[in-house]
Amino acid sequence: EMDFFNKEHNFNLGRDLYESYFPRSTKAIGEASPNYFYLHEKGQESTAKNMALTLGAPKIIVILRDPMTRSFSHWNHIQRPDSNFALRFKGKSFNECTEQVSNDRAKNSILLRSKYVENLKKYRASFGSENIYVAIQEEIKANSAVEYNKMFNFLGVDELALDKEYRDIHSASYNTTIDTASEQFLKTYFKDSVDELKALYPDLDYSKWNTY
């Protein structure tokens, strides 16, 4: 995760430094930095503008996860002994970090990073909907080669063989599960956002997500 376009101190190091990380001349080459997506967060507002200034109109792939499980994963990551971000949530239960701090003034990244439509619309406005490909993480895990080939077609590169064996990378297991109170709260909290997403991208398969 380079965090080049969303961190001004990185971006100010210049295009030459960024391009030095991509020495090969290929038909398609890129990087993955999840933080580029969160244009609503303080200090990240210039991310899309910085990308456009440097890359013009790149092809962008956005991978979305079920909002509830993404939030739960985020919370679990904060609780790791070696994590040093979002310290106000450290040592607190999942419910304390979601339902109990869900008002707009809380600016709760555990929740807000799971509301996708606002940032998707900003990227579509900045680069054109034809340059934005949206995929569902759960579908990628279930049908890896099929989903990767959809992305490769979007990028205009050769497809993968369908009989390849794929394995999970950075797969984490948790010692806890989502408590009932948080589950019921989040199904209500995310409902409008998920409905907006389904209206914006009605052809995606949301069947592996929770019901909102």
Image (cartoon, grey):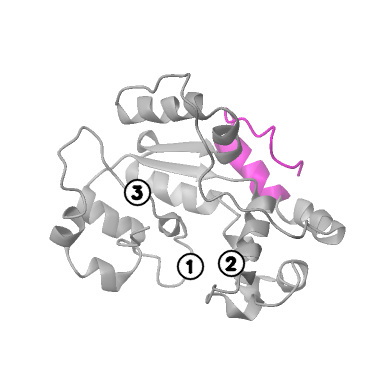
Numbered disc 2: secondary structure: helix
Residue 126, label in figure = 3
Q: Position of residue 80 (x, y in %)?
A: 61, 69
Foreground mark, 3 or 2, reads: 2
**Residue at which label 2 appears:** 109
> What whole-number distance in Å separates the C-alpha atoms at marks 3 and 2?
23 Å
Q: Position of residue 71 (x, y in %)?
A: 65, 58
In the picture shown, does residue 153 fall above or below 51? above
Label 1: few (<14), some (14–19) or many (≥20) C-alpha neighbours in 10 Å = few
Q: Of marks 1 and 3, which one's residue comes earlier in the chain?
A: 1
Q: Image point 55% across, 49% down: which residue?
A: 117
Q: Which residues are the magenta region?
A: 191-212
Q: Position of residue 137 (x, y in %)?
A: 56, 40
> What whole-number distance in Å separates the C-alpha atoms at marks 1 and 3?
17 Å
Q: Is residue 11 magenta?
A: no
Amino acid at the residue labelled 2: Ser
> What whole-number distance in Å separates the C-alpha atoms at marks 2 and 1?
8 Å
- Horizontal side of 7 relative to 139 (left or right) equals left
Q: Are marks 2 and 1 in contact (CB under 8 Å)?
A: yes
Q: Of marks 3 and 2, which one's residue comes earlier in the chain?
A: 2
